[in-house]
Image (tube, grey):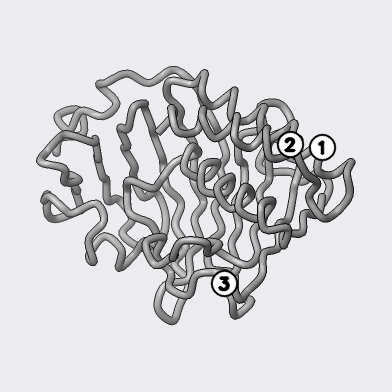
Amino acid sequence: MHKIIFKLSFILLFIFVSGEISGGSDVSEEFKRRINKGLQFYNSVDSYQYTLQKKEWLGLKYIDQTILFKFKKPFKVYLKVLKGEDKGSQVIYIKGWNSGEARVKTRFFTFNLDPGGSLMLSTNRHPLFEVGLGNILTGTLQDIVLGQQNGDMTLTYLGKKTVGLRTSHAYEIIFPVSKSKRGRRTMDRKPGQYYAPRVQLWLDTKNSLPLRFRIWDRYKRLVEDYIHTDLRLNHLTDLDFNPIIYKF
């Protein structure tokens, strides 16, 4: 995944240089600089941990959770639900391990689960192989590249916003509703479609990593809101993703 992000940084730089984003040259130049800074910084990071405050619209209600999230490249994930639905549950997912399935531990059971199956997606809008800061950057950049090529994207700088103890530069990106996907899953997006008609991305003022990511659907409903606090970098080892350590 980090190789894909590295390649996207060069694609984005070329497109930004060759054209302007609607919203003013000063805004677009700063956004270009900060996105590329975030990509370069992310490529230098081996592992990270943060507290995730997650709010998602699923079915007919919002699901709010606070999650301890750990990630190590190339793709190792550990998470534990600290508050909200499924409190206490833990998940380990490592690409290429456990026959491609996630290992899940709840208060009563331990079992394997398809990381992108219907049961996993019953309480999550994204499969496990789409989680993490890298996927937020990658997904947003793909839409930005498409919007710049089409010339139908509007970018607005919202000013500085505080997330936990850190400060961010907040941006809002508007895409045509008619060209946005209809379903809630990423796989519902057809070629040439945007993930969502309205996106907010808040980038850390120091390293340009995403501190908050918000999505609205075609019905003007907030459907995804992810807040990242207590970020720690480059301190995790393979033991942090070993099921034996967590008594799975």
How much space separates mark 1 and mark 3, taking CA atoms?
Answer: 27 Å
**Amino acid type for the residue under numbered disc 1:** Glu
* Number of the label disc, if any, that sits on residue 126: none
Residue drawn at x 63%, y 37% is: 12
Q: Are marks 2 and 1 in contact (CB under 8 Å)?
A: yes
**Amino acid type for the residue under numbered disc 3:** Asp
How much space separates mark 2 and mark 1, taking CA atoms?
Answer: 5 Å
Between circles 2 and 3, the one closer to the viewer is: 2
Q: Are marks 2 and 3 in contact (CB under 8 Å)?
A: no
Name the quarter where the N terminus is drawn. top left
* Number of the label disc, if any, that sits on residue 29: 1
**Amino acid type for the residue under numbered disc 2:** Lys
Residue placed under numbered mark 3 in the picture? 217
Between circles 1 and 3, the one closer to the viewer is: 1
Does 149 sit above or below residue 94? below
Residue 199 placement, left or right of 70: right
